[in-house]
Image: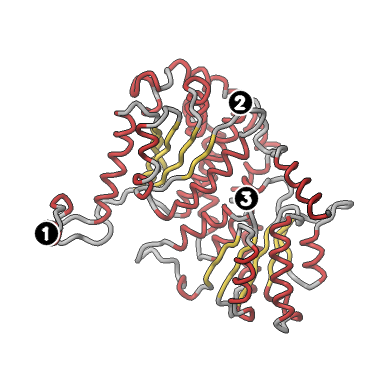
């Protein structure tokens, strides 16, 4: 489904800024026990993320809950932040940008989907004031059920609904997703929901937000946009199947990506990891990757800045830095075949505009040329670049891409000897926020 090339990361291709072959192989060899450990984790269930692609029951449950929620709905609002939102946005964007002929059945009849992941008092106030609350539905996602930003969104929406005389319909208008009840642990989202007859779906307590996009956390939004959730998981499963059957890290794409990236960070002082897809339908994938990489690896004085870019637009903003600034960025270019797609430019009009090179060509031909040119330009400038070519862009390929980078991130953490699943430094900010609110 995807073909990865790290040739542009190697010294043999880009000179002194690249990684020596023996340095790459040394890190791949270090990943042998890491892959063995992941296989054991799959077999024992110690890392539930690896078994998510095998699940089926939670999809049917999510489909039923959404079907009931979306009845007679005009707008579907998602409240959640960080990993509780970015995965859903990434998947919904795929459904929202299907080209004619690929539109999911009944897409135009579906409610408009909106995501509010950043808390801004004025935005929330004006949003709630402008909604037709009788025909708006709310999906609220918080793993702990205590996330302050999400909880105040939920409570404000609940107050607005009650203020509009719809108090008795809260069970029809809201769907929430949070961890199962735990003795001695407060879960405000679950408690408030259950008291008002609002349906609650269970968030897997063993899968953190940034790794949850393949669970019901992300799949609710995918289903809302008419995507095939089972195909998304099948795409992810193909990566797990490869993990279980591959002979060595030298043959496993996520391991190769992790070894090349960490090798460049440790040997060539790379400080920025750039994700640059060349299609609007993967713009939110870049944002999702930023959280995955930064929050998983930025610990104990280690890690690199993760940067989301989008081609071709960011050729006109960020590319100058990557080509001619400090040699401290690794750019990953995600390419999707675009030749022959889009409007064809009239030859006479193109000549009149002084652009004979696009005469009689489709818009997609220009993007295809750019996707080819930019990695070559980076290579010529001696700047590390990785290229990933996607066979197509559908649910299965996106599921494959998501699992690839989740496992690549886990393996990168193994090479850095850190835990990819916690975020201890973030807790201090939460503690101080509570302190100032109490004052």
Question: x, y percentage for residue 171?
Answer: 73, 74
User: Is 94 displayed left or right of 356 in the figure?
Assistant: right
- Badge 2 local density, few (<14 within 10 Å), some, or many (20+)? some
Label 1 or label 2, whichever lies nearer to me, is 1
Secondary structure under tag 3 reads helix
- Residue beneath disc 1: 352
Residue furthest out toward the right: 184
Looking at the rendered structure, which numbered label has been put on residue 274?
none
* Closer to us: 287 or 185: 287
Is 251 rendered above or below residue 57?
above
Secondary structure under tag 1 reads helix
User: Visible in this render: residue 248?
Assistant: no
Disc 3 versus disc 2: distance between alpha carbons?
23 Å
Secondary structure under tag 2 reads helix
Is 139 rendered above or below residue 408?
below
Disc 1 versus disc 3: distance between alpha carbons?
49 Å
Q: Give the position of the C terminus as an image quadrant.
A: bottom right
- Marked residue nearer the N-terminal end (1 or 3): 3
Disc 1 versus disc 2: distance between alpha carbons?
56 Å
Question: x, y percentage for residue 430?
Answer: 75, 47
Label 1 or label 3, whichever lies nearer to me, is 1
Residue drawn 65% across and 65% down? 139
- Residue beneath disc 2: 416
Residue drawn 41% across and 35% down? 4
User: Is 182 displayed left or right of 93 in the figure?
Assistant: right
- Marked residue nearer the N-terminal end (1 or 2): 1
Quadrant housing residue 328: top left
* Closer to us: 127 or 31: 127
- Badge 3 local density, few (<14 within 10 Å), some, or many (20+)? many
- Residue beneath disc 3: 83
């Amino acid at each position: 489904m995807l073909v990865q090339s790290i040739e542009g990361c190697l010294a043999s291709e880009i000179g002194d800024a690249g990684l020596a072959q023996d340095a790459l192989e040394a890190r791949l060899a270090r990943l042998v026990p890491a892959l063995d450990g992941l296989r054991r984790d799959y077999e024992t269930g110690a890392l539930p993320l690896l078994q998510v692609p095998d699940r089926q029951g939670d999809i049917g449950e999510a489909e039923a809950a959404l079907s009931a929620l979306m009845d007679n709905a005009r707008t579907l609002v998602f409240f959640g932040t960080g990993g509780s939102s970015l995965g859903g946005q990434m998947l919904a964007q795929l459904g929202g940008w299907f080209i004619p002929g690929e539109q999911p059945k009944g897409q135009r009849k579906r409610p408009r989907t909106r995501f509010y992941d950043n808390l801004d008092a004025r935005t929330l106030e004006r949003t709630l004031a402008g909604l037709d609350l009788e025909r708006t539905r709310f999906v609220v996602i918080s793993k702990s059920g205590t996330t302050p930003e999400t909880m105040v969104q939920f409570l404000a929406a609940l107050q607005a609904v009650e203020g509009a005389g719809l108090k008795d319909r809260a069970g029809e208008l809201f769907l929430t997703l949070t961890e199962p009840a735990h003795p001695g642990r407060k879960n405000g989202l679950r408690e408030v929901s259950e008291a008002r007859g609002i349906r609650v779906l269970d968030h897997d307590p063993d899968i953190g937000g940034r790794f949850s996009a393949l669970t019901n956390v992300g799949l609710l939004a995918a289903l809302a946009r008419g995507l095939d959730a089972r195909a998304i998981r099948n795409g992810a499963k193909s990566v797990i199947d490869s993990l279980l059957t591959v002979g060595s890290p030298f043959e496993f794409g996520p391991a190769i990506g992790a070894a090349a990236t960490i090798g460049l960070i440790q040997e060539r002082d790379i400080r920025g990891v750039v994700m640059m897809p060349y299609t609007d339908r993967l713009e939110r994938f870049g944002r999702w990757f930023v959280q995955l990489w930064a929050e998983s690896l930025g610990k104990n004085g280690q890690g690199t800045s993760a940067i989301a870019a989008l081609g071709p637009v960011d050729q006109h903003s960020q590319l100058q830095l990557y080509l001619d600034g400090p040699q401290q960025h690794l750019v990953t270019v995600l390419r999707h075949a675009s030749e022959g797609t889009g409007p064809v430019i009239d030859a006479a009009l193109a000549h009149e505009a002084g652009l004979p090179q696009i005469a009689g060509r489709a818009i997609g031909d220009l993007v295809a040329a750019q996707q080819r040119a930019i990695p070559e330009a980076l290579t010529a400038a001696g700047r590390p670049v990785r290229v990933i070519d996607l066979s197509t862009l559908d649910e299965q390929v996106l599921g494959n891409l998501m699992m690839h980078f989740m496992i690549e991130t886990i393996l990168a953490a193994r090479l850095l000897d850190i835990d990819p699943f916690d975020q201890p430094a973030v807790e201090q900010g939460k503690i101080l926020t509570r302190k100032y609110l109490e004052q």
